[in-house]
Image (tube, rainbow, N blue to C red):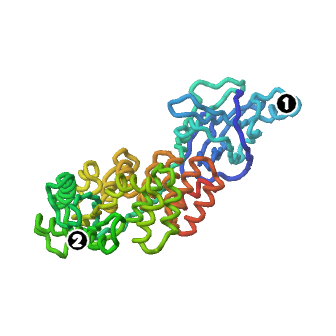
């Protein structure tokens, strides 16, 4: 019987010794006994091994028997014939020495001359290139019992079935507990005040809309049963025109006015609101200029950076040196510099597992990383729900090493190595779990040298997952 061969290397050993009992065996029609059949993968190589006990095989002196291993896809079409073992009689052996062209197979693993009454065995081991179809495949041995190149019907035995796909071990990291979930809500209000006044007129110009925006922000937090406000920070700014002393009074007084407005509106204790102020918003002016298309933008920016230290002198000279641009600034820029920034600091209560499972889909921002991780553990690893939780977690906590590492692991479960590496690039802390994940990604991308480096670091740190994954590389 002739067949095609896919080989990287062939190791042959024919032994004439007593055969030890294997953990499993297959009795063939020829009388041969197969033990210790195994198929293993290391990187891009697949090794097929078995022990063939030929002691009970009987062959006519002029005949031979071919034992032809074949590796084939379970339920598919992929297959590879491996070199056969030929067991022949003495007369057949002598004939082939004189007429090698009469051999039945293009290439045999080894030829064994049958010697009755002796213990004879072959340690069979063949290495061939890995192919994708081998992931779910089985090893067979086909017997040509007549020695005529034709396979006797039914003389085919299944030896072992293996899944050769690389199954990585991934190390997820449990996030540290967040005893108090502190959050903040930022906003900016542009309240209008009458000339040199610091009291708020709720009906004046834009104030109805601006106050409505502030109150909506406060209500969003205050009226939510899951939230508790811990503080409200206010910072008021004035524009640079006018004297610095006057702007100090205006910035401070207008910030205090908003504090009093919120205190009266909600009954907050005065200690809950904290005030700060910036009398003249020069940084805001510089930011405006950076984004503007004013003809003398660069000259003004240079003047702001290197002009007089006295801000009153600086503002007067600005008006004189750049009169046309100053008109634009006074109309388009300065009103926006007079503002109050506010930050509402609050804490979120903890949630039980059932609540957390619901909130992952509806309001994930309320959950800590630890709560999200607990939800993920309720799903089958690699399932769509499992992967979705880690995807949500990294979107909610994009700067977290733990969130990025676990999201990368979830992607590696799906074989999406390049996407996983993008998350791993964001992991700044040196930890064996991240090195293990980088190693797995490199294995999937067939960059085995880098994989070995990363995996060695993780294994040196004592990570059990790395020990498993390193077996694939060694």
Q: Quadrant of residue 180?
A: bottom left
Q: Residue 152 location in percent, x, y? A: 62, 25
Name the residue that disc number 1 marks: 100
Q: Could you give the CA–CA distance between mark 1 and mark 2, rounded to whole angstroms? A: 108 Å
Horizontal side of 186 relative to 427 (left or right) equals: left
Q: Residue at x 52, y 43 (%)?
A: 163
Q: Residue 272 location in percent, x, y? A: 19, 72
Residue 253 disc label: 2
Q: Residue 265 location in percent, x, y? A: 11, 64
Horizontal side of 112 relative to 307 (left or right) equals: right
Residue nearest the viewer, comparing 222 with 352: 222
- 86 versus 168 height, above or below: above
- 78 versus 274 height, above or below: above
For label 2, the crowd category at 10 Å Cα-Cα, with few meaning under 14, some 14 to 19 and many 20 or more, is some
Q: Give the structural element (helix, strand or loop) at label 2.
A: helix
Quadrant location of the N terminus?
A: top right
Q: Residue 263 location in percent, x, y? A: 14, 68
Residue 265 seen: yes
Quadrant location of the C terminus?
A: bottom right
Q: Nearer the viewer, mark 1 or mark 2?
A: 2
Q: Quadrant of residue 84?
A: top right
Residue 463 seen: no
Q: Residue at x 42, y 64 (%)?
A: 283
Q: Residue at x 42, y 62 (%)?
A: 173
Residue nearest the viewer, comparing 13 with 232: 232
Horizontal side of 59 relative to 405 (left or right) equals: right
For label 1, the crowd category at 10 Å Cα-Cα, with few meaning under 14, some 14 to 19 and many 20 or more, is few
């Amino acid at each position: 019987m002739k067949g095609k061969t896919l080989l990287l290397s062939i190791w042959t050993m024919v032994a004439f010794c007593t055969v030890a009992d294997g953990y499993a065996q297959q009795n063939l029609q020829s009388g041969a006994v197969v033990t210790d059949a195994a198929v293993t993968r290391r990187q891009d190589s697949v090794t097929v091994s078995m022990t063939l006990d030929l002691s009970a095989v009987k062959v006519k002196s002029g005949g031979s028997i071919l034992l032809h291993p074949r590796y084939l896809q379970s339920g598919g079409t992929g297959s590879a014939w491996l070199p056969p073992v030929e067991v022949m009689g003495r007369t057949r052996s002598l004939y082939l020495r004189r007429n090698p062209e009469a051999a039945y197979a293009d290439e045999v693993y080894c030829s064994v001359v049958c010697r009755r009454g002796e213990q004879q065995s072959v340690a069979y081991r063949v290495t061939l290139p890995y192919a994708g179809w081998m992931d779910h495949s089985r090893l067979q041995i086909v017997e040509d019992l007549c020695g005529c190149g034709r396979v006797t019907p039914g003389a085919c035995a299944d030896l072992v079935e293996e899944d050769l796909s690389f199954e990585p071990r991934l190390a997820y990291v449990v996030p540290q507990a967040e005893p108090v979930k502190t959050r903040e809500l930022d906003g900016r209000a542009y309240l209008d005040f009458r000339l040199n006044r610091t009291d708020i007129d709720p009906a004046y110009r834009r104030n109805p809309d601006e106050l409505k925006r502030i109150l909506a922000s406060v209500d969003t937090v205050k009226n939510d049963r899951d939230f508790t406000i811990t503080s409200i920070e206010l910072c008021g700014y004035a524009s640079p025109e006018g004297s610095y002393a006057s702007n100090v009074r205006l910035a401070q007084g207008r910030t205090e006015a908003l504090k009093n407005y919120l205190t009266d509106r909600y009954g907050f204790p005065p200690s809950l609101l904290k005030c700060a102020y910036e009398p003249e918003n020069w940084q805001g002016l510089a930011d405006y200029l950076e984004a503007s298309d004013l003809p003398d933008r660069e000259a003004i920016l240079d003047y702001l950076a290197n002009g007089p230290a006295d801000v009153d002198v600086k503002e007067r000279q600005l008006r004189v040196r750049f009169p046309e641009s100053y008109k634009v600034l006074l109309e388009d820029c300065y009103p926006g510099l007079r503002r109050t920034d506010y930050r509402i600091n609050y804490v979120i209560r903890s949630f039980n597992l059932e609540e957390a499972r619901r909130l992952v889909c509806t309001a994930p921002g309320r959950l800590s990383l630890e709560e999200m991780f607990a939800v993920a553990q309720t799903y089958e690893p690699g399932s769509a729900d499992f992967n979705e939780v880690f995807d949500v977690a990294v979107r909610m906590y994009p700067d977290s090493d733990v969130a990025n590492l676990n999201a990368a692991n979830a992607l590696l479960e799906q074989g999406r190595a390049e996407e996983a590496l993008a998350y791993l690039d964001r992991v700044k802390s040196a930890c064996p779990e991240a090195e293990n994940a980088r190693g797995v990604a490199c294995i999937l991308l067939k960059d085995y040298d880098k994989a070995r480096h990363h995996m060695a670091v993780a294994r040196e740190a004592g990570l059990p997952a790395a020990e498993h994954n390193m077996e694939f590389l060694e």
